[in-house]
Image (spheres, rainbow, N blue to C red):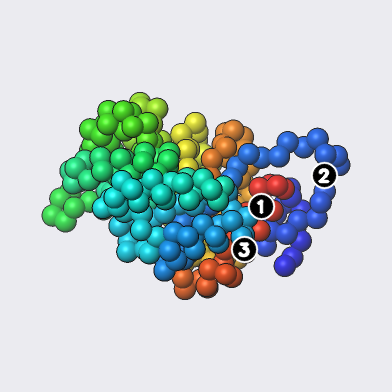
């Protein structure tokens, strides 16, 4: 793995840095590292937590509604939920977010959100990842209409989210893959629990200049999804440091924001087995956070 200077690292550098700090007074970032269970969809909850602990992760982000084997779903019993929460605590692993499939461009998300909010509260997870979703077939909407509809639907669940103290974190993805419309939705909601899940790949790989994303999401990032990707459009996820996503610049932005949340890795089994990808991701992120 190549070594890089922290000030001039390029977007395709692999992140193993020489220790260039002049003293030990440099403040250590409070950002934490997690992974979504797409990295190990066949693992039981016990296996997920054991892997997180083995490889030095701070948290896990269970993916709901995707037939993963961890058992964290809305039909889980009250007893199972209590036992799952105990297991997270005993292992010293944070349940940092429940990654849902909710798409707030449609009304169904308003119906489906409350039981997922309850699930998060029961498990001790602080929030839900949600989507805008694609524009429904047969409908025509410009981005201003999309922003209004998504914000209106998010506000329909805001009161219940407030009662349970669960965040609703809208991802930079699909119709709102850029930071600008996500920022506009959050501004329209003006609610402390409705914030951004900054998927760092989508805005950059879909042509939004990094400075535009940063301005749009200033003060709004509550959670992140981290992955690298090759150029050329579409989603072509590669190991951290092998793609074009400007990781150090993004981490510097998050540091400047005072972000103390989770850098949650999202990748899929074709990238490799969990015993290969999990240790590789956490090592890469610890390095870039320390030296970006």
| Residue located farthest toward the right when viewing the structure as drawn | 22
Visible residue check, residue 278? yes
Q: Position of residue 277 (x, y in %)?
A: 56, 67
Against 40, residue 20 (above or below) is: above
In the displayed structure image, the side of residue 284 where residue 3 appears, left or right = right
Earlier-in-chain disc, 2 versus 1: 2
Which residue is more in the foreground, 104 or 97?
97
Q: Position of residue 290 (x, y in %)?
A: 70, 47
Against 93, residue 254 (above or below) is: above
Q: Mark 3 or mark 1: which is in front?
A: 3
- Look at 31% across and 40% down and name the residue there: 117
Residue 286: which numbered mark, if any?
1
Visible residue check, residue 212? no
Q: Mark 2 or mark 1: which is in front?
A: 1
Describe the element under mark 3 as helix, strand or loop: helix
Residue count near mark 1 (Cα–Cα under 10 Å), binned few <14, some 14–19, many ≥20: some
| Residues at circles 2 and 3 in contact by the CB criterion of under 8 Å | no
**Mark 2 vs mark 1, CA separation in Å:** 15 Å
Return the residue at label 3.
279
- Look at 42% across and 54% down and name the residue there: 62
Q: Position of residue 224 (x, y in %)?
A: 49, 46
- Look at 25% across and 34% down and name the residue there: 157
**Mark 2 vs mark 3, CA separation in Å:** 25 Å
Return the residue at label 2.
21
């Amino acid at each position: 793995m190549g070594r890089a200077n922290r000030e001039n690292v390029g977007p395709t550098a692999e992140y193993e840095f020489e220790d260039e700090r002049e003293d030990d007074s440099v403040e250590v970032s409070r950002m934490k590292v997690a992974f979504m269970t797409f990295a190990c969809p066949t693992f039981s909850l016990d296996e997920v937590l054991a892997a997180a602990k083995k490889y030095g992760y701070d948290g896990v982000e269970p993916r709901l509604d995707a037939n993963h084997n961890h058992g964290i779903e809305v039909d889980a019993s009250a007893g199972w939920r209590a036992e799952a929460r105990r297991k997270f605590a005993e292992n010293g692993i944070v349940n940092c977010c429940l990654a849902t499939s909710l798409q707030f461009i449609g009304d169904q998300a308003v119906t489906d959100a409350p039981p997922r909010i309850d699930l998060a509260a029961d498990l001790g997870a602080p929030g839900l990842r949600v989507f805008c979703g694609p524009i429904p077939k047969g409908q025509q909407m410009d981005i201003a209409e999309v922003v209004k509809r998504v914000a209106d639907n998010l506000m329909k669940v805001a009161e219940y989210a407030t009662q349970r103290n669960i965040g609703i974190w809208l991802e930079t993805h699909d119709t709102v893959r850029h930071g600008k419309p996500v920022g506009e939705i959050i501004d329209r909601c003006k609610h402390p629990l409705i914030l951004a899940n900054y998927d760092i790949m989508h805005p950059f790989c879909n042509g939004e200049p990094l400075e535009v994303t940063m301005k749009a999401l200033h003060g709004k990032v509550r959670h992140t999804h981290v992955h690298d990707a090759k150029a050329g459009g579409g989603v072509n996820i590669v190991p951290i440091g092998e793609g074009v996503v400007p990781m150090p610049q993004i981490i510097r932005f998050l540091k400047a924001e005072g972000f103390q949340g989770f850098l949650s890795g999202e990748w899929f089994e074709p990238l490799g087995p969990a015993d290969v990808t999990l240790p590789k991701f956490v090592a890469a992120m610890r390095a870039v956070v320390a030296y970006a």
